[in-house]
Amino acid sequence: MTLTAYGLLFGFIFGIMLEKSRVFEPRIILRQLQLKNFIMIKTFLSAVLVASLSIYTMQEMGYITGLHLKPVLIEANIIGGLILGFGMVFAGACPGTVVAQLGVGYKDAYYTLIGAVLGVLGYSYAKEPFLDKWFYAEKGHTLTMDQVLGVDSGVLIAVRAGVLIVILVWLEKKFPTDKDCLLYTSPSPRDRQKS
């Protein structure tokens, strides 16, 4: 199986999981940002847990080699995070959920998609003449937590997994998923048209 085929397969699986978890819905996204619904953070923390354990295991088994870390650029991360955060608040979507919103019939998602495409184009045109001079002139260091803390990466992954499990269990006890789902999910535009 080629890398493209694997990418399509896992993209398809991710799309199904995104739709089933309902974290693409604008109301879920906005309520998460308001700290009133925690389905989204529970889903993402679960994904981080599974991905970090999987990548570490595949690296140790030799299936993954040569991961290239990007330099730490604090200012660029802060500005990019603010732009993404404001965009999520205004659009009720993030670039990863817009395709799922289009798939279930949210018409507003077309505007989000157009905004995302314009943002990518703007970034690509601004990168070389402006951003490279401001942010990338002095390359940051490729830091990892195991380097900063001086701990073996396997130990750090195990500790991170334990902490994430504790956080997920606490979130589920404090904010049960079944209550979140019942209170805040709504039928998609396509489902509303059928009824």
Image: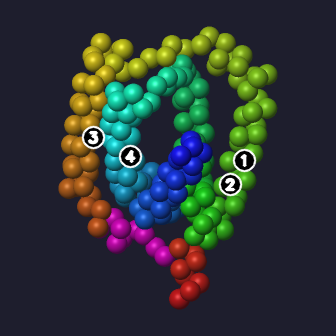
Q: Which residue is mark 4?
A: 47
On whether residue 186 falls in the magenta region, the answer is yes
Marks 3 and 4: which is nearer the front? 4
**Mark 1–mark 2 CB contact (< 8 Å):** yes
Q: Is residue 195 left or right of residue 143?
A: right
Which of the two labelled residues, at mark 4 and mark 2, occupies the earlier sequence position?
4
Q: Which residue is mark 2?
A: 113
Which of the two labelled residues, at mark 3 and mark 1, occupies the earlier sequence position?
1
x and y, in percent, of residue 126 in the image: 76, 29
| Magenta segment | 179-187
Marks 4 and 2: which is nearer the front? 4
**Amino acid type at image mark 4:** Ala
Quadrant hosting residue 127? top right
Which of the two labelled residues, at mark 2 and mark 3, occupies the earlier sequence position?
2
Vertically, is 80 above or below 42? above
Vertically, is 9 above or below 120? below
Q: Is residue 62 left or right of residue 176?
A: right
Mark 3, Cα crowd under 10 Å, few <14 / some 14-19 / many 20+, is some
**Mark 3–mark 4 CB contact (< 8 Å):** no
Q: Which residue is mark 3?
A: 164
Q: Which residue is mark 1?
A: 117
